[in-house]
């Protein structure tokens, strides 16, 4: 591991339903910049059980998520399963000893979920586990702006503990993402809300398991307007702006350049939709073929995950070795 590079970590909660939005906003940009970092990618299966789950399904989803990540091009030693590194839950408990309950109750995501039928303590403690995921790796973190409050809590906890013990125990992480995070890919049928795998209407979501015809149908049927003007303005033209954003992120070009290209090439919305569909299919098709290869070779996937686990475990062991005496423990024999 290069000591001259900053560590960077991100995570994906297992669901088995990878969407084009997640790929374009998280996976594709990370693949482009991770060479500049010592990169760690956590398959966050502990985070997945904060809501009701089925054990056999959890095992299946964990494997499916790994298949997708390897198929997208992430190297074997960068991906690990969160639950296989016991230090994550251990550190989350330690962080909880330095956190006021009121602070957790004020977290925006908890407040948005607490009125749902299923509630448990894990939902309240979710930010502590996320902070643990980050602080153990002395890393900056790649997350969306919707997780900004959790990153700020992580920074506050790092500073609080450092001040309590009068020495630098934890690195204060920075939130890393790109300029496209100023926007969110929207639901194809409801372009006023973000595309979410939990949506009740699958027509509004492009999943990675969708074939080319399904992708075309979803894009062609997406909600737009009747003006026949290609303008990027989510307030006035959310449907068209969503298509522009999808094309821009697929081609990795600016919104401004994308608008000029599409205005020149598209005399109507149907042509626009065809171009956007083609750009998405161009990305998804080779990844789908790779996914199938990994599905057919589970031994190779498990071998890769073990390589990632060993690398992550080495980092976590090193971190605990440095901090255990300061905290008053002897975790490593």
Image (tube, rainbow, N blue to C red):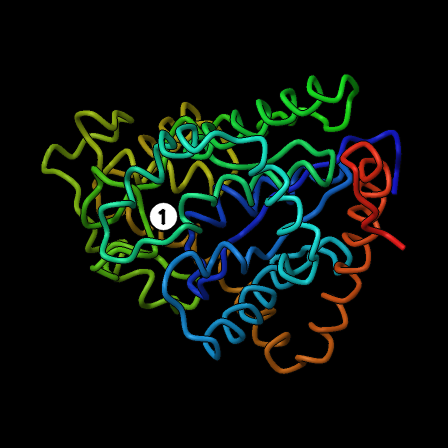
Q: Where, by quadrant of the figure, is residue 29 drawn? A: top right
Q: Number of callouts in the render?
A: 1
In the rendered image, the vertical position of residue 106 relative to residue 44, given as above or below: above
Q: Position of residue 14 (x, y in %)?
A: 49, 61
In the rendered image, the vertical position of residue 160 relative to residue 22, given as above or below: above
Of all residues shown, which one is farthest toward the front? Answer: 328
Tell me: 329 left or right of 267: right
Q: Residue at x 47, y 59 (%)?
A: 48
Residue of label 1: 275
Of all residues shown, which one is farthest toward the left? Answer: 226
Tell me: 192 left or right of 28: left
Q: Position of residue 252 (x, y in %)?
A: 52, 37
Of residues 67 and 111, the one drawn nearer to the viewer in this rendering: 111
Q: Can residue 180 be seen at all in this image of the molecule?
A: no
Q: Can residue 166 be seen at all in this image of the molecule?
A: yes
Q: Position of residue 256 (x, y in %)?
A: 41, 23
Q: Which SS class for mark 1?
A: helix
Tell me: 41 left or right of 120: right
Q: Position of residue 306 (x, y in %)?
A: 76, 67
Of residues 288 and 105, the one drawn nearer to the viewer in this rendering: 105
Q: Residue at x 55, y 68 (%)?
A: 62
Q: Residue at x 70, y 34 (%)?
A: 139
Q: Residue at x 39, y 29 (%)?
A: 102
């Amino acid at each position: 591991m290069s000591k001259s590079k900053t560590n960077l970590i991100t995570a994906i909660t297992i669901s088995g339903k990878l969407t084009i939005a997640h790929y374009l906003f998280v996976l594709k940009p990370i693949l482009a910049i991770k060479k500049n970092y010592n990169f760690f990618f956590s398959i966050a299966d502990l985070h997945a059980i904060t809501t009701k789950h089925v054990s056999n399904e959890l095992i299946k989803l964990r494997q499916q998520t790994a298949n997708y990540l390897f198929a997208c091009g992430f190297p074997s030693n960068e991906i690990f399963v969160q639950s296989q590194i016991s230090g994550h839950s251990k550190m989350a408990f330690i962080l909880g000893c330095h956190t006021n309950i009121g602070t957790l109750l004020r977290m925006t995501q908890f407040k948005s979920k607490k009125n749902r039928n299923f509630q448990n303590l894990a939902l309240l403690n979710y930010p502590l586990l996320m902070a643990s995921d980050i602080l153990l790796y002395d890393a900056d973190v790649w997350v969306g702006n919707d997780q900004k409050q959790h990153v700020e809590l992580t920074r506050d906890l790092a500073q609080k503990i450092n001040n309590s013990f009068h020495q630098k125990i934890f690195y204060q992480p920075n939130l890393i993402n790109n300029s496209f995070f100023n926007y969110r890919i929207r639901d194809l049928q409801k372009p006023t809300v973000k595309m979410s795998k939990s949506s009740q209407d699958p027509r509004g979501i492009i999943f990675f398991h969708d074939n080319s015809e399904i992708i075309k149908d979803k894009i062609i049927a997406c909600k737009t307007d009747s003006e026949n003007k290609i303008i990027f303005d989510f307030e006035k033209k959310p449907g068209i702006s969503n298509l522009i954003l999808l094309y821009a992120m697929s081609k990795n070009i600016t919104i401004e350049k994308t608008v000029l290209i599409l205005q020149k090439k598209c005399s109507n919305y149907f042509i626009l939709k065809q171009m956007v569909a083609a750009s998405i299919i161009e990305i998804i098709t080779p990844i789908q073929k790779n996914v199938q290869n990994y599905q057919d070779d589970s031994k190779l996937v498990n071998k890769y995950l073990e390589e990632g686990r060993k690398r992550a475990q080495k980092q976590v062991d090193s971190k605990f070795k440095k901090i255990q005496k300061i905290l008053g423990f002897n975790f490593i024999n």
